[in-house]
Amino acid sequence: MDNTSDIQTDKFLYEHALGALNGLAIGDALGMPSQTLTTQEIKEHYGVITDFVHHFLIIPFRMVYMAVKSISRGLTN
């Protein structure tokens, strides 16, 4: 295996690992407000989920992802 493919594989693995860790951190932060509540308390405070969230609300998460990605590039370059 040549050096170029090793570098590409390392970059691929790094980016996917970073994406997984970022997803974990964002998911953990989003769940924090309800983590100490019982199921009944969550239903009383937030209601019951009856539908999916419209896709336009995903845009802020994409912005966070792009910001983290650009920061990580600055740290590794």
Image (tube, rainbow, N blue to C red):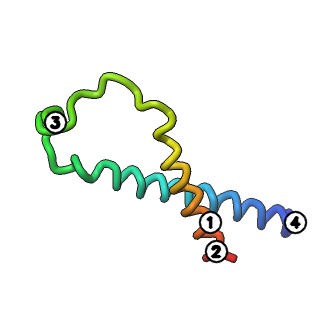
- In whole angstroms, how far apart are the C-alphas of marks 2 and 3? 42 Å
Mark 4 against mark 3, which lies toward the viewer? 3
- In whole angstroms, how far apart are the C-alphas of marks 4 and 3? 54 Å
Mark 4 Cα shell of 10 Å, populated few (<14), some (14-19), many (≥20): few
Between discs 1 and 3, the one toward the N terminus: 3
Q: Residue at position x 69%, y 77% from top?
A: 77
Q: Residue at position x 56%, y 62% from top?
A: 67
Question: Which mark, by number, is residue 70?
Answer: 1
Contact between marks 1 and 3 (CB within 8 A): the answer is no
Mark 1 against mark 4, which lies toward the viewer? 1
Is 5 on the left-hand or right-hand side of 49?
A: right
Between discs 4 and 2, the one toward the N terminus: 4
Contact between marks 1 and 2 (CB within 8 A): the answer is yes
The single residue placed furthest to the front in the displayed view is 56
For numbered disc 1, what is the local secondary structure?
A: helix
**Quick check: 44 above or below 26?**
above
Mark 3 Cα shell of 10 Å, populated few (<14), some (14-19), many (≥20): few
- In whole angstroms, how far apart are the C-alphas of marks 4 and 2? 26 Å
| Amino acid at circle 3 | Thr
